[in-house]
Image (cartoon, grey):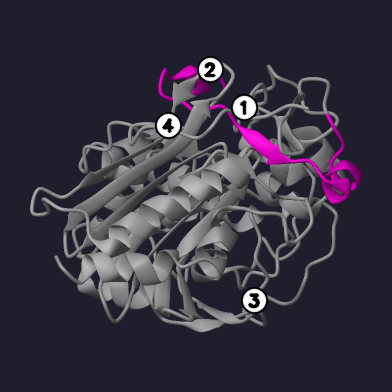
Amino acid sequence: MLRFPEPHLKYQLSKRRKNVHQAENELVTLLHQKALKTFPGMTMALGKGDKIIWQAAAGYADAKNHVKSVPETQFGIGSITKVFVAVIVLQLVEEGLLSLDDPLSNWLKKNRLAGIANAESVSVRQLLSHYSGIPSWENQPLWISAARGQQARPNKIWLPDESLDYIRGTNALCLPGEAFNYSNSNFTLSGLLIEAVTAHSFEEALRRRIIHPLLLKSTFLAAGGALDSGNMSRRFHQRDAHFIRNAGIADAFTPAPNNMLDVSAINLSAEWAAGGIVSTARDVMTFMLALKNGKLLQVESMTEMQRWLPADGAEMGLSLFRTDTDDGVVIGHGGNVLGASACVGWYEETDCAIAILTNVGSMHAAPEADCASLFFKQSAVGKLAQAIASRH
């Protein structure tokens, strides 16, 4: 039977801490156990105020070659990418280059929007809040097979319009503004909007407006060969009956321990502006603290970003979720793509921020298949993190 090696764990305390407190010990133990049972590799960062106060890495970035996970290990962050996109759009609004209430059709040509339900009447605001009614390419069986399943090809570099092609001719989910429907298509279109307004590629806008100003040296947009970064973790995916039925198994996938698949051969270019960023827990935390503390957006933009609407048991702003958990109200976002899952957010009451990155994805598997967001919701991570943050 295939087995991952005994997990490695490394953690770093802030310089203010000389001794490991009970909460830190418990969190270290929790990560170690999770790496042993579920996630071959994972990293975590905690923040308070404008500082990163704690980091940890558990397990392996590449178990086969005994490469340990370290705080510098890079993982796909999935839909946390959407928060980066919303920040760029709001910066463009601040600069007077567009309005949140502009129709998307003011910026994208008719042939680009052809066949996409609601696309010609939807507003920028409705895209960012998932109130567009536009179907998600992520829910189309043919796209799932082509990008994350049986038909996935190692050397395929996806263009944004290719994913949109899978929803052309499908019906709208509702009228624009009528109801919340989470859709990756909204952020593919938002990425194209950024390109139309800035006259730069989305990747270049991301570098100029967020990555370079915040010195995020380990963050990039996945586009095929870029995944060969020396610090990039291998990627694994939950292999259960649901995944086999919904996606199928590509020839490029290889068996891995714990009933998983090694899916590292398939790049993340299909996700693009909806979920294609690769990063580290430290970089993601740096970004989220900068957002929370007003270093990326003006007060008016933050108010718009946190204008909450109903969203399937939570509340939705402009790319940010507000969720009531057992440990307090959290503002943030999760991510889940082929071979990676992640979550990041901050607690409203305690100002404690958490970022968790793993090398296991669970999309198209059973709802109970483990991922970073499920680990955060169902474990004592939030409680322990806030206990640690309370002493900083």
| Residue 139 vertical position relative to residue 339 in the rendered view, above or below | below
| Residue name at image x 83 percent, y 21 percent | 251
Circle 1 residue? 267
Q: Residues within 10 Å of mark 2 (few under 14, many from 20)?
A: few
Between the residue at mark 1 and the residue at mark 3, the CA separation in whole angstroms equals 30 Å
Q: Secondary structure at mark 4?
A: loop
| Residue name at image x 82 percent, y 27 percent | 250
Q: Earlier in the sequence, mark 3 or mark 4?
A: 4
* Front in this rendered view, residue 74 or 57: 57
Circle 2 residue? 225
Q: Earlier in the sequence, mark 1 or mark 4?
A: 4
The C terminus lies in which quarter of the figure? bottom left
Amino acid carrying label 3: it is Phe
Amino acid carrying label 1: it is Asn
Q: Nearer the viewer, mark 1 or mark 3?
A: 1
Q: Earlier in the sequence, mark 1 or mark 3?
A: 3
Circle 4 residue? 69
User: Do callouts 2 and 1 mark residues in contact (Cβ within 8 Å)?
Assistant: yes
